[in-house]
Image (spheres, rainbow, N blue to C red):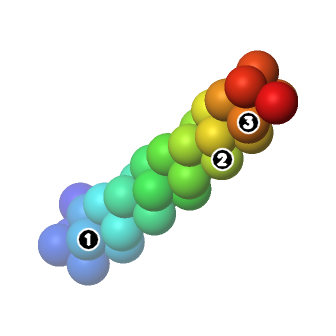
Amino acid sequence: MPNKTIAALRFILNSSDITLYRIQTNYHHRFFITATA
């Protein structure tokens, strides 16, 4: 694989990880609010 392809794949994986992390934190935050309300 060329280095550019590896870099692109890493970038996609990193960005998707961040997106998943944001979704998880948003979900837990909402659940916490509804549980304490």
Quadrant containing the C terminus is top right
Question: In the orientation shown, which residue stands out farthest toward the bottom?
Answer: 4
Q: Is residue 7 above or below residue 29?
A: below
Sequence-first tag of 2 and 3? 2
* Among the 4 quarters of the image, the one containing residue 6: bottom left
With 9 as the anchor, is 1 left or right in this view?
A: left
Camera-nearest label, 2 or 1: 2
| Residue 12 shows in this picture | no
| Residue 26 shows in this picture | yes
What secondary structure is found at the residue carrying circle 3? helix
As shown in the figure, which amino acid type bears the numbered disc 3? Ile
Q: Is residue 32 above or below residue 30?
A: above
Quadrant containing the N terminus is bottom left
What secondary structure is found at the residue carrying circle 2? helix
Residue highlighted by disc 2: 26
Residue at (56%, 43%) from the top-left corner? 25
- The front one of 28 and 8 is 28
Marker disc for residue 7: 1
What secondary structure is found at the residue carrying circle 1? helix
Residue at (17%, 72%) from the top-left corner? 3
Residue highlighted by disc 3: 33
Question: In the orientation shown, which residue stands out farthest toward the top?
Answer: 35
The x, y position of residue 5, in whole percent, is 32, 70
Residue at (56%, 52%) from the top-left corner? 22
